[in-house]
Image: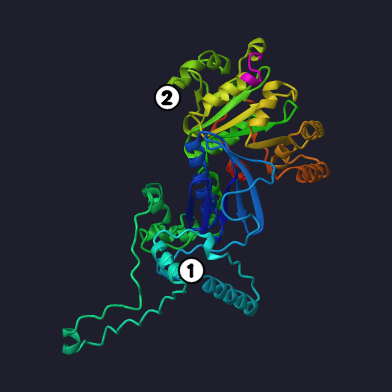
Amino acid sequence: MIAQARITSDTTATVHLADRSVEVVGADLPEIRDRIKDVFISSAKEQDRDIDVVIVEPDVRHHLQVEPTGRISARDADDRPMYGPDDDEPLLPAVTDPDSAASEACAVSAASAVSATSAASASAESTGELAAVRPHGGRRRRAAAPVADSAASSGSAVSAPSAAPAPSADAAPSSDAAAQPAPAPESRPLTPRTAPPADDRPRLQDLQTQTAKLTRVRATRGFPGFVTRLTGGRIAPAPGRAEQADIARLERIQRPLEGPRNIAVVNLKGGAHKTTASLMIAATLGVSRGGSVLAWDNNETRGTLGWRGLPTDHHRTAVDLLHGIDGLRAPGASTTDLDPYVRPQGEMRFDILASDEDPGSAALIDDTAFADLDEVLSRFYRLKVIDTGNNVRASNWLASVRSADQLVIVSTVREDTFNAAAWMIDELRATGLGEQVDHAVTILSHGSKGKFDATLRKRLLAHFGAHTRAVTEVPYEKQFADGTHLDWTRVSKPTKEAWLDATALIVDGL
């Protein structure tokens, strides 16, 4: 059987596992989805195996496979039964108001359920909206169990009385009234409360997640920013439209990820700006996210990523790391053990793993070696940006594409690089990797300042737009033309802005 999550509203969901059901509450729909995935990942870790799951939303079904490592991937739909309600059973919003829980606990009879369903239908007809109703019997009640048993044994439905209005604060009680003890609320039966199972008790993370964060964003730019600085924050206007867009873009880049992720940068033509793109993606991620980013040269011959980065006092490469991989697999291995093999890039806050300069040595990196390196590097980096070679049939090239959580296709606005990328797309689809292409991001890089064929550009936008999830453009940058190492301080602001846009699109796909 398959585990199932049912998203019942923008702030509630229920996850049905083999041994339990978990109610999930969040501030919004993205948070609900993230918390559902956390529950599935925890279950996969407990079982120490991959689990197949289905996430049910009102208009869509997500068929996924969840690994104990935290990796989540799509899978083909099938007809296996699921834990919890049937897939086609209507969704019912979960009760989140604690005061309404007692009322729901009392309304347990079939007559009450029918009445509630009829009322929902009548409301739907009067408002023009369809209400999604599920029988109450499909939901778990822990604290309400004793009441439910009592109601069932008596054979009658118990309804909760309406609450009496609170007395006015201005009305002083009379002496007689004060002397009389308060009457016992006979019409409201007391419900014994039992402690929830230990694994369902709220944790600190639950408390922090459910706590509303009302931090107000203050303007830092333009005249609103000037007012904020002038008054020391006592008067703090909201950011303007442009600053709000920049804040939203940065939040997209910085959003948390569910485990390590691979970004593969591809084109089969040399000079297509793959290495430049790999450096700029890694640098933008490093500066925006604060590190834990690797740019990895997975060229099957001699790559230039190591040359284009800041120089270091060693020249070790991926081949050297492969020879010392057992030490990095040790339980006590740390980032300091990795330092002799990678090249830190200073304020850009990412590292480079260079390819070997000897083509004969580089041949040691086949698909098996790539998998070994990927496994170890995933222990130390959240994001790996993989610069690839030019041979679509090289085993390490195919391994990097298959491992990619996000494929990035790079092309200059030139006929030869466009043709190479277009042929590569056809080849990937022919070899069963069409889903990678559908999910890909295309980056069109302008190789000269103000000089490009407008008709060719339109062809590229149309072609890649038909094949990939998103297409974006980055401008000509003089620093990139000389082939020297990347100097972040020399990169122009328009170029940084364009790469921020491209990187946000990339992280959206992770």
Tag nearer the camera, 1 or 2: 1
Residue type, numbered disc 2? Ser
Question: Horizontal placement of 243 versus 414: left or right?
Answer: left
Q: Is residue 286 magenta?
A: no
Q: Is residue 128 above or below residue 224?
A: below
Q: Is residue 351 above or below residue 28?
A: above
Q: Which mark is residue 334?
A: 2
Q: Secondary structure at mark 1?
A: loop
The part of the image, by quadrant, that contains residue 482 is top right
Question: Horizontal placement of 170 versus 35: left or right?
Answer: left
The part of the image, by quadrant, that contains residue 443 is top right
- Mark 1 burial class by Cα count in 10 Å: few <14, some 14-19, many 20+: many
Q: Which mark is residue 108?
A: 1
The type of colouring in the image is rainbow
Question: Where residue 306 sits in the image (x, y, percent)?
Answer: 58, 22
Q: Is residue 400 visible?
A: yes
**Magenta stretch?**
363-368
